[in-house]
Amino acid sequence: MSTDERSRPRTLAEALRTWDDAALGRVLQQRPDLATPIPADTGQLAARATTNASAARAINRLDEFAVDLLEALSALPEPVTLDALAAGVGQPVDVVRPRTKELLALALVWGNEDDLRLIRAVHELLGPTPAGLGPVTTRHFGDLDRLIEEAGPDAREVLAKLTWGPPTGSVEKADRPVTIASARTPVERLLARGLVVPKDANTVVLPRQIGLHLRGGRVLASTRPTPPPLDGKTVSIADRAAAGAALDLVRLVDRALEQLGTEPPPVLRTGGIGVRELRSLANKAGMEEQVAGAVLEIAYAAGLVAAVEVGTNELWLPTGSYDDWLELDTSHRWAQLVVAWFTGLRAIGLIGRRDTGGATAAARERLINALAPDLERLLSPEIRLLTLQALAEAGPGNAPTTEAVTTWVAWHRPRRGGQFRDDLVEWTITEAALLGLTGLGALASHATAILKQEPTADDLAEAIAPLVPAPVSEFLLQADLTAVAPGPLVRAVQDELTVMADIESHGGGGVFRFSESSVRRAFDVGRTSEQLHKWLAEHSRTPVPQPLTYLIDDVARRHGVLRIGTASTYLRCDDEAVLTGLINSNLPGIRFRRLAPTVVVSPSPPDMVLARLREAGLAPLAETFDGVVQVSMAGTRRGEPPRRRTSRDFVDSPAELTDDQVRAVLEKIRVGDRIAAERPDELVGEPTAPAETITILTNAAEAGTRTWISYVDHNGTASERIVEPVRVADGWLTAYDDQADQPRTYALHRISTARPVEN
C-alpha cells in the first residue's frame, strides 16, 4: 500500500477530522439537525450525519441534478472518479465538479475526485434499483457484446425493454434446467448466458453491469443541470393590479370578520366551519364561497379568528387581535395577513377536498372544512417560498404559466411531495393573486420583500405603501341617494357611513346607497335627524342633495311615533287614531288591548311585535321601562387568538443555526476530539477503585498535570473529560477543564475512571 493510499480517509469520520472549522461550520448550517443535541466529537457528528433520517432531510432539499449525481454514484461501482461520474450523467466535468463539491460539503459524499463514495444511508434511501438499474451480480461475463450477439435478435429486443428500467420482467416458470444448448425462448437464452438472472420463479432481473453496458456507460438517459425555463407572457401593470387585490383582501377580511362577529357560526364536532355556514357567510359578505374559505383561513393564520366557548356552545369569533388589527393602517393590515399566510402551515387548497390521508374509509370520504385542524401540512411553507422564488426568477413584468412554475419547483424539490407538491404550487399561485402578491400572474415589485431571509410585516408594509392610496375623510353625495368615496375611507368615517347607508359596491373607495331602511337603521341606534344632516354636511365634498334631505326628514317624522315596551309588550302614542287603526289592523299572530286612549299592550314579546309593525310599514321606537329610548346594536364578541404553529415547531424542520451557535458547537466538537485523541489506551473501559481514583487525582493536583476522567452526571449521562485537578477534598474534585474558564466541581463517587495524561 502506497503512502498516499494509507493517508486517504477510510470513513466519513476520518474525512471530517481533516476539515477545518469553516467547512464543518458550513455542513452544520446546511444540516442544522446534526447539532441537536451537540455532538460529543467528530465521530459522533459523522455517525449522526450517516443516519437515514438526517440523510433524508438533506436529500429532500436537493435539486434534480444533485439527486441525479447521487443516483449515478449509487449505481456506478466504487470507487467512482469524477470523470466516470460526468460520463454517467452525460455532462461535462466542469459542470459536474462544482455540484459534486456541494455534495461533499453536505457530507452525503466523501473522498476526493479520484475516489468518490456515498454514505451508506444514501444508498439505502435511493433504493436497490438506482436510476432503474438492477442489482450487482458477481458473475464475470468476459466479452458482453459477443454474448448479446449470440443470444439472437429477439433476445436483444427483450434486453432493450429492460435497459432503461424497470429492470425486471415476468416470465413463465421453466419446467427444466436451462442451458445454452436447451434454451428455446429469448428469455431462456438470456438466462443461460447470465444476461438476466432469476429473481424468483416468475421474474427475471437485468444485472447492473449488463444495464450499464447496454446504456453505453450512461446511468441516466438525460439530465438537466439547470432549472427549466419559465415561459409565459409579459404584463405591464402588475404592480397596480396587485395593489388593488391587496386592498380588496383587507376589505374582504374586514367584512367577513364583521359578519362573523354579528352571527358567529358553530364549531363542528370535528373542527372547522360547516359548508352551509360558510356559504351563508360568503353570501352575506358578498364574496364567492371559495374566496370566503381562503379569507377565513388567512385571518385564522393571522390570529384574527378563534374558536370560543360561549355557554355550552363553541363558536367561531373574531379575536381581540382583530380590534388591534383594525387600528393599523392599510399597508400594515395587509402585511400582517401576508406574513401569517407565508409562514403558516395551512394548505388552504385542501378545503372541499376528500381527506385522502384519513385513517379509515369513512374518514377518507369526508370533506375537509375551512378552519379544520387537519389542514396543516409541513410542506406548505417550503413550496410557497419556492413558488414565489420561481415568479421572481421569471423577472419583473413576466407572468410564467402555471405548468412552467410547477416544473421549475419540481426540479428544485424532486423528492418532496409528488402530486401534492404540484397541487401546492397551483394553490400558491391562486392565493398569491388573492393576497395581492401577484398581478395578472406576474410577481409584484412589493412582493419581493417577502423573499427576504426573515420577512417582517414592516418590510412588506414599507414596500407597498407607495401604491396604497391615503385614506380620505370625505365623500361625494349624489342626487341618486348614493355616496361615492374617492378612496379608502378613514375607519371612523366608514363606520359611521355604513350605519346610515348600505355598501353597494367595493373598489378603491366604494359606493354607499341611502334608503328608508338604512336611514331608519341609523335612527334605531340612537342617531337623530339633526345629527345626520350635520355629519353629512361636514364630510361631503358636495352639498347634501335635496332628495337625501327629504328622505332623512321623512323617516324622522315617522320614526319613533310608536314606542314599544313590555307588559309583555306595550305601545303608546299621542295620536289615538293611530292606535285605533292598529287595533283594527289584525296583524297576523299579534293581539292588542287598549289600556288608555294613548296606550295599548300585547301579550306577544317585543321583538315579534316590532317585526310585525315594521312589516306593516310602521316605524316604532323601542324604549326602556322608564321611558328612555333604547338603543340597540348588533353585539360583537371576541375570542383569544389561537396558538399559531409554523414549520419550526416540528423536529423534521429544525431552525437554522446562527454564527454564534455554530461556533459554540464547533468548540464542543473540537474539545471532544482532543479528549478522544488523549484518551489512555490501557484499561479505558474498566472503572478504577475509589481509592485509586482519589490517589490519581490528588497526585495530579500536586503535580499540576492533566487527567482523563469518565464522569456520570446526576441524569445518568456518561461523558469523558480532560481536567486539570486543583483540589481533592470532602468528596469533591475541583478542577479546570477545556470547556470552561472557571474551575468546576465533580462528585468523586460519580468519577468511574481516572487516568493520567502525558503532557
Image (cartoon, helix red, strand yellow):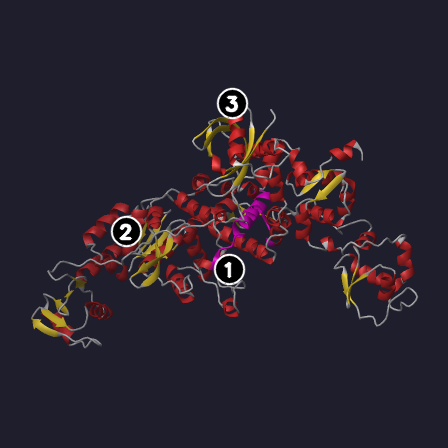
Residue 578 percent across, percent down from the top left: 13, 70
What's under tag 3, amino acid-wise? Glu
**Helix, strand, or loop for circle 3?**
helix
Residue 522 percent across, percent down from the top left: 24, 56
Residue 38 lies left or right of residue 297; in this view the side is right
Mark 3 Cα within 10 Å, few/some/many (few <14, many 20+)? Answer: few
Q: Residue at x 36, y 44 (%)?
A: 328
One can see residue 237 in this view: no
| Chain-order first, disc 3 or disc 2 | 2
Mark 1 Cα within 10 Å, few/some/many (few <14, many 20+)? Answer: some
Residue 582 percent across, percent down from the top left: 16, 73
Mark 1 or 3: in front is 3
Q: Which residue is mark 3?
A: 702
Q: Which residue is mark 1?
A: 350
What's under tag 1, amino acid-wise? Leu
Residue 607 lies left or right of residue 26; in this view the side is left
> Can you say whether 616 is above or below 648 in the image?
below
**Helix, strand, or loop for circle 1?**
helix
Instruction: Decide whether residue 383 is among the magenta residues.
Output: yes
| Chain-order first, disc 1 or disc 3 | 1
Quadrant of residue 192 in the image?
A: bottom right
| Chain-order first, disc 1 or disc 2 | 1
Extent of the magenta region: 374-402
One can see residue 576 in this view: yes
- In the rendered image, which quarter contains the C terminus? top right
